[in-house]
Image: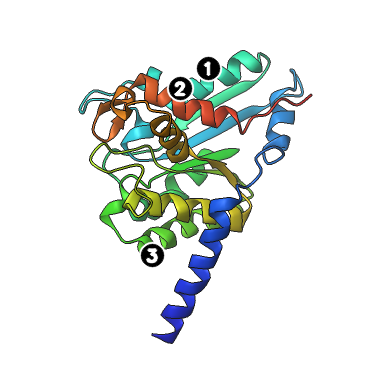
Amino acid sequence: MKNKLLLFAVTFFIALIAQSQTPTNNDYLKPVLTDLQKQWPNNRTINFVFHGHSVPSGYFNTPNVNTLKAYPHLTLCYLKGRFPYAVINVITTSIGGEQSEQGAFRFKEEVITMHPDVIFIDYALNDRSISLERARLAWVKMIEEALANNKKIILLTPSPDLDEDILNDDSLLAKHSNQIRELALFYKLGLVDSYNAFKNRCLAGESLSSYMSQSNHPNEKGHKLIFEEIKKIFPDSN
């Protein structure tokens, strides 16, 4: 009991810091940006792997999968427009309905084997089916496996669920978002704060339903909002 209380206290303290301090993304992908600018014969294939659940998989109204309007493909189009000499692969290893424990189980064999330069992890929407503690252990397992293989990691906070109040700081998605921010800060990783972007739209008076194809899946507009947050981790190199 004493150890659990200590762990809770430490986690709570770090979470408070994470809420007020966002990890800087400006230099995190600098080596990747440098490689993206190289021309033949000095260039190489750059692999971006998107690991997670139905949202990065491209599910809009289930069972419809709109790969070309989902944020991984939007990221590919943006990068190719910006880096015309680069050879870029965008690979989705995501599975609809999966949570982070399942994703962690297959992480080494199905993600690391793709030889990723950058790994995006997006599981929090489905992690509500497991506890925060279990989710944290699964995310840590994936993070540390990636770091052991010298991979860059970008953590994504969740897109919203219309059945949950995004303005409620005690909601499950809000708690998972805080935990993800904490992990990004602790491990000094890249962060795409999708949840905060949607929350800001709501605070500005917009209806979240205009960003959703169903209660828990973004539509094209919602994916574009996530993509706009992803763009921030690829700052201008000038």
Q: Residue at x 60, y 30 (%)?
A: 232
Among the two numbered marks 2 and 3 on one chain, the one whose residue lies closer to the N terminus: 2
Asked if labels 1 and 3 touch by Cβ distance under 8 angstroms, the answer is no
Label total for image: 3
Asked if labels 3 and 2 touch by Cβ distance under 8 angstroms, the answer is no
Q: Say whether residue 188 is visible.
A: yes
Give the alpha-carbon distance from disc 1 to disc 2, as whole Å.
6 Å
Image x and y of residue 205, in percent: 38, 28
Identify the amino acid type marked 2. His
Q: Dot 1, how many residues are within 10 Å of its Cα: few (below 14), some (14-19), or many (20+)? A: some
Q: Dot 3, how many residues are within 10 Å of its Cα: few (below 14), some (14-19), or many (20+)? A: few
The label nearer to you, 3 versus 1, is: 3
In the shown orientation, is residue 208 left or right of residue 154? Answer: left
| Quarter that holds the C terminus | top right
Give the alpha-carbon distance from disc 2 to disc 3, as whole Å.
32 Å
Image x and y of residue 115, in percent: 56, 40
Q: Residue at x 58, y 27 (%)?
A: 231
- The residue that label 1 is drawn on is 77
Q: Secondary structure at mark 1?
A: helix
Of residues 165 and 69, the one nearer the viewer is 165
- The residue that label 3 is drawn on is 133
Image x and y of residue 31, in percent: 73, 36
- The residue that label 2 is drawn on is 73
Q: Dot 2, how many residues are within 10 Å of its Cα: few (below 14), some (14-19), or many (20+)? A: many
Asked if labels 2 and 1 touch by Cβ distance under 8 angstroms, the answer is yes
